[in-house]
Amino acid sequence: MQVNPYVVFNGNCAEALAFYEKAFNGKIGMISRYKDAPAAEGYVTPPEVGELILHAQLDIGGAVIMFCDTSPHLPYNVGNNIMLSVAFDSEDATKAAFAGLKDGGTVVMEMQETFWSKCFGMVTDKYGVTWQTTVVGRAHVTHK
C-alpha cells in the first residue's frame, strides 16, 4: 500500500507545480490535463478547463506528492484542498477501505473503473478528510 498527499488548486496548479519543483529541486513525474481524459457517459470536459491539470506527480527526494486543479463540478475551498491518495495492490483491499471510509462519510465519487485505475473511488470521511482509494496497476497517461 502507498499513501500520498494530494493537493488541489483552483486553476493555478501548473504554476504551483513549477514553484514546488524549483523550491524542492524536485522532478515532475507526469502531468495529465483535463483535455486528456476520455469523455465519460453524459459528460464532456468544458473547453475552458481543458488545459487545467487533472493529475500531476512531483518526486521530492523519493516522496511523491500529487497535484491537480479542482474538477469543474466540485467547489474549491481553501483549507480542505488537501486529500490523501491510497493505492492498494488489490481491488478487494481498495473496495474494503472505501467501504470503511464511507461509513458515516460522504461519497464524492462512487467506486468505479476509470481510464487511470481499474478500481477508484473518492470519499470524505466523517471527520472531514477526503480520501482517494485506488488499485495499483493501470498506468497514467503522461503529457507535459
Image (cartoon, rainbow, N blue to C red):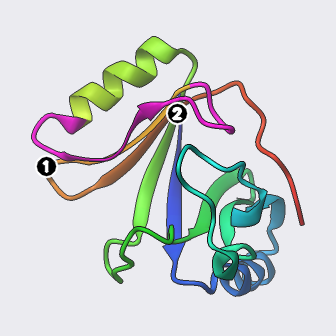
Q: Position of residue 48 (x, y in %)?
A: 66, 82
- The residue that label 1 is drawn on is 126
The reply, left or right, for residue 34 in relation to residue 42 is right
How far separated are the C-alphas under marks 1 and 2?
20 Å
Write down the region rendered in magenta: 102-118
The reply, left or right, for residue 38 in relation to residue 104 is right
Q: Residue 65, located in which quarter of the rendered image?
A: bottom right
Residue 65: assigned label: none
Q: Position of residue 28 (x, y in %)?
A: 82, 64
User: Given the current orientation, which residue lies at the most extreme left position?
Assistant: 104
- Mark 1 falls on what kind of element? loop
Up the image or down, 123 lies above or below 15; here it is: above
- Pointer 1 or 2: first along the chain: 1
What amino acid is at disc 2?
Thr
Residue 134: assigned label: 2
User: Given the current orientation, which residue lies at the most extreme front position?
Assistant: 42
Up the image or down, 31 lies above or below 115; here it is: below
